[in-house]
Image: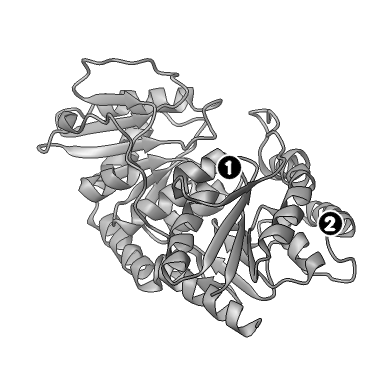
């Protein structure tokens, strides 16, 4: 029996993939614990029996909506990722000393996990819940790369082993990527395990009876972290979908309540949340989203094509992967019109080439093995490390 400590940021999309892996490890007789600034989030996603150590976190700064490209990337690092690492580190060290893990599994954006393992001499694996880093997003941005490298070096001197030079985003022991080369492209030294698709707690109160089996179903979601900028885009989606109400019904996820509720709408249902996996399993014909890695991979796992409208961070990279794979159409988040969005929807709903590409990637995902394959690699790392 080995002990695995998962270090995750307080973000749903980064915790969800670890839940299935942890469950698989526990089923094999291992012990698992998490460290997260939001223990309640982990308990909600992994179940009330999860062993979770709390730690300090960092607030996500209000990022100006106009920030794009290198400036947006720098903002993410300077105002969230780096402060998060410093804030989490004391709690991660305390958890490691109490739990005494054999292996640390550090989220690619939770640098405190990697640096703590490095300082304590523990083997560690990278949990890459997005494949964007494997395409080198800093290529062609030498000044940004120099700035990032300098900040990471300073963070290592503070939290890790100054004698090392390993990038905390890429473990020299094991890098687990929850995607497949068929979508993300080849990457040296990466273990592609596909999405970690596991059962999740049911969202109570979802009106399943609203669904009309005689029409195609379109799911629109911008995730949980874009409520501040999504109002206009969701309104455009609603307009385009209502124009196709004779053939299409739509579910729009609006956690911020920007659209308002319309209980008597038979064509477009606006709700604060949905049981996304259950919906995909029941039958969704297209997904419109911000190219968030989890939403994209869950849709493609089920063979569902996409319309992607990336906003920031890794989303433009993931959107490019979808388009390059032939599994969807990309639109401009800030400028798309209802006619343009409607045309993109028509293309993926009625284009057999998009369905074929989505099905091909879904097959590759399932062949990669998911949570059991990730657990196999972690098992092996623990055995090799003694």
Residue that sits furthest to the front in the current view: 98
Side of 332 relative to 384 (left or right): left
Q: Nearer the viewer, residue 170 or 122?
A: 122
Q: Which mark is residue 159?
A: 2
Q: Residue 186 placed where, x, y %? A: 53, 73
Q: Is residue 347 visible?
A: no
Among numbered discs 2 and 1, the one appearing first in the sequence:
1
Q: Which mark is residue 39?
A: 1
Residue that sits furthest to the left in the current view: 214
Q: Secondary structure at mark 1?
A: helix
Side of 87 relative to 218 (left or right): right
Q: Residue 34 placed where, x, y %? A: 59, 54
The quarter of the image holding the C terminus is bottom right
Q: Residue at x 73, y 44 (%)?
A: 84
Q: Nearer the viewer, residue 328 or 271?
A: 271
In the image, is residue 269 above or below residue 134?
Answer: above
Q: Residue 289 placed where, x, y %? A: 42, 40
Q: Which mark is in front, 2 or 1?
A: 1
Q: Residue at x 47, y 23 (%)?
A: 256
Q: Nearer the viewer, residue 358 or 223?
A: 223
Q: Is residue 124 visible?
A: yes
Q: Residue at x 23, y 56 (%)?
A: 352
- Mark 2 vs 1: CB contact within 8 A: no
Q: Residue 293 placed where, x, y %? A: 49, 51
Side of 356 relative to 307 (left or right): left
Side of 258 relative to 89 (left or right): left
Q: Nearer the viewer, residue 115 or 338?
A: 115
Q: Residues within 10 Å of mark 2 (few under 14, many from 20)?
A: many
């Amino acid at each position: 029996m080995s002990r695995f400590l998962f270090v995750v940021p307080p973000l749903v999309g980064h915790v969800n993939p670890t839940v299935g892996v942890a469950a698989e490890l526990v089923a094999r007789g291992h012990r698992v614990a998490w460290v997260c600034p939001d223990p309640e989030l982990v308990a909600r996603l992994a179940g009330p029996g999860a062993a979770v150590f709390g730690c300090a976190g960092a607030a996500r700064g209000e990022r100006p909506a106009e920030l794009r490209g290198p400036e947006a990337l720098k903002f993410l690092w300077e105002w969230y990722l780096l402060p998060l690492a410093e804030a989490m580190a004391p709690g991660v060290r305390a958890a490691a000393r109490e739990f005494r893990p054999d292996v640390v599994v550090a989220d690619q954006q939770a640098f405190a996990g990697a640096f703590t393992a490095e300082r304590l001499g523990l083997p560690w694996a990278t949990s890459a819940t997005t494949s964007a880093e494997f395409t080198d997003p800093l290529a062609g941005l030498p000044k940004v790369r120099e700035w990032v490298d300098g900040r990471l070096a300073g963070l290592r001197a503070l939290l890790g082993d100054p004698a090392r030079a390993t990038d905390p985003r890429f473990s020299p022991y094991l890098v687990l990527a929850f995607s497949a080369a068929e979508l993300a492209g080849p990457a040296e030294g990466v273990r592609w395990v596909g999405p970690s698709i596991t059962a999740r707690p049911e969202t109570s109160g979802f009106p399943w009876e609203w669904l009309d089996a005689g029409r195609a179903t379109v799911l629109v979601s911008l995730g949980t972290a874009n409520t501040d900028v999504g109002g206009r885009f969701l309104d455009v989606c609603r307009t385009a979908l209502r124009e196709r109400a004779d053939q299409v019904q739509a579910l729009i996820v609006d956690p911020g309540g920007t659209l308002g509720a319309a209980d008597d709408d038979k064509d477009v249902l606006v709700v604060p949340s949905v049981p996304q996996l259950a919906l995909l399993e029941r039958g969704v014909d297209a997904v419109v989203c911000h190219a968030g890695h989890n939403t994209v991979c869950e849709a493609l796992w089920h063979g569902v094509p996409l319309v992607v409208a990336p906003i920031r961070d890794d989303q433009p990279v993931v959107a490019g992967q979808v388009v390059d794979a032939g599994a969807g159409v990309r639109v401009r988040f800030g400028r798309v019109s209802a006619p343009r969005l409607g045309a993109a929807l028509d293309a993926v709903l009625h284009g057999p080439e998009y369905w074929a590409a989505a099905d091909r990637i879904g097959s590759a995902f399932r062949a990669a093995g998911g949570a059991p394959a990730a657990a196999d690699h972690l098992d092996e790392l623990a055995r090799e490390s003694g």
